[in-house]
Image (spheres, rainbow, N blue to C red):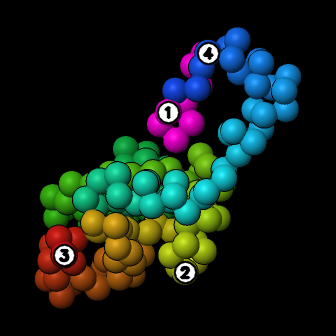
Amino acid sequence: PLLFVNGEFVGGFDEMKRLDEQGKLANLCAPGNLTQRLEHLINKAPVMVFMKGSPDAPRCGFSRTLVEIFKKNNVTYGSFDILMDEDVRQGLKQYSNWPTYPQVYAKGTLVGGLDIIKELEESGELAAALNP
């Protein structure tokens, strides 16, 4: 195995073992700066969706509905499955001050959740909101 932290190569198994023996591995791999990680994820694509499951396999009705709206409107987007990372799941709620999922970001800015996306679609403003 190879270990990368914040996109930087740290080493292979021998290096991980050495760092663990020195008590440094846990600190190196700790969430550390969750805000930086969230900002990186939010900006991973021009439109980013944080949802339960994936676009191909949504794991809740709200996420499924959002995927259907985006498909109907030909929205290209990246996604992140919040069920796979509890730090992101809880941290993003605080970061965005938005308590529910899915969350939609356009160019790094929170657009909102499913209710907002529905309103934007109904008013014909969805495309403009996703391309600020």
Identify the residue at image location x=35%, y=73%: 109
Identify the residue at image location x=35%, y=52%: 44
Question: Label 3 sits on what residue type?
Answer: Pro
Is residue 4 a member of the stretch shown in magenta?
yes
Query: Is 76 located above or below residue 23 in the figure?
Result: below
Asked which secondary structure carries label 3, the reply is loop
Identify the residue at image location x=44%, y=69%: 103
Q: Is residue 121 left or right of residue 24?
A: left
Asked which secondary structure carries label 4, the reply is loop
- Give the spatial CA distance, label 2 vs label 4: 38 Å
- Give the spatial CA distance, label 1 vs label 3: 32 Å
Query: Which is nearer the eye, 71 or 43?
Result: 43
Q: Earlier in the sequence, mark 1 or mark 3?
A: 1
Q: Which residue bears the numbered disc 1?
A: 8
Quarter residue 123 falls in: bottom left
Tally the marks.
4
Q: Which residue bears the numbered disc 3?
A: 132
Q: Which mark is residue 79?
A: none
Segment colored magenta:
1-8
Q: Which residue bears the numbered disc 4?
A: 12
- Give the spatial CA distance, label 2 vs label 1: 30 Å
Q: Earlier in the sequence, mark 2 or mark 1?
A: 1
Q: Which residue bears the numbered disc 2?
A: 97
Query: Which is nearer the eye, 25 or 51?
Result: 25
Image location of residue 21, percent across then percent down? 85, 22
